[in-house]
Amino acid sequence: MLTFYIPYAFSLKDKRQVAKSLIEKTRRRYNASVAEVATQDVIKTLTVGIAVVSGEAAHAKNALDEIIRFMEDNTYAELQSVEVE
């Protein structure tokens, strides 16, 4: 689970624009399951869950690491925390 801080979001509409753009870019590029999973009503906080399926744990970890870097580099939001299960 990734938590982003969106300093310039002043409404849920602003937040949804950031969320939609980031989630769609990530889905298209990596064919991974990505969704907003919590904090839907908190204007400046975006919490995203990512699911990757692989036959090998190392491959799944590498894919998640790459997705996290991509998401951090492709948004104006600030990555606050990463929780991997």
Image (spheres, helix red, strand yellow):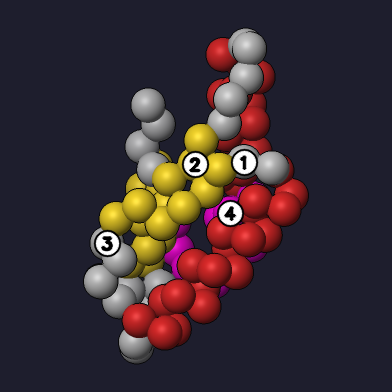
Q: Nearer the N terminus, badge 2 or badge 3?
A: 3
Say which amino acid is labelled 1: Ala
Residue located beneath label 1 in the image? 32
Counting residues from the start of the chain, the first of labels 1 and 2 encountered is 1
Task: Describe the element under mark 4 as helix, strand or loop.
Answer: helix
Q: Distance between the residues labelled 2 and 3?
A: 15 Å
Cα separation, mark 1 vs mark 2, equals 7 Å
- Contact (Cβ within 8 Å) of mark 2 with mark 3: no
Q: Which amino acid does label 3 sit on?
A: Thr
Q: In the rendered image, which residue does mark 4 sit on?
A: 71
Q: In this view, does 23 lie to the left or right of 28?
A: left
Q: Going 63% across and 61% down the picture, which residue do you hit? A: 24
Which label's residue is closer to the chain start, 4 or 3? 3
Q: Earlier in the sequence, mark 1 or mark 4?
A: 1
Report the disc number at residue 57. none
Crowding at mark 3 (Cα within 10 Å: few <14, some 14-19, many 20+): few
Residue at image position (58%, 63%) is 22
In the picture shown, does residue 39 fall above or below 2?
A: below
Q: Which mark is residue 50?
A: 2
Contact? badges 1 and 2 (CB < 8 Å): yes
Q: How many marks?
A: 4
Q: Where are the magenta residues, as a range?
A: 70-79
Whole-number angstrom distance, CA of label 1 to CA of label 4 = 12 Å
Badge 2: residue crowd in 10 Å (few <14, some 14–19, many ≥20): some
* Residue 15: % across, % down: 42, 76
**Residue 77 is a magenta residue:** yes
Of callouts 1 and 3, the N-terminal one: 1
Question: Image height check: is 3 above or below 50?
Answer: below
Q: Residues within 10 Å of mark 1 (few under 14, many from 20)?
A: some
Label 1 element class: loop
Mark linked to residue 39: 3
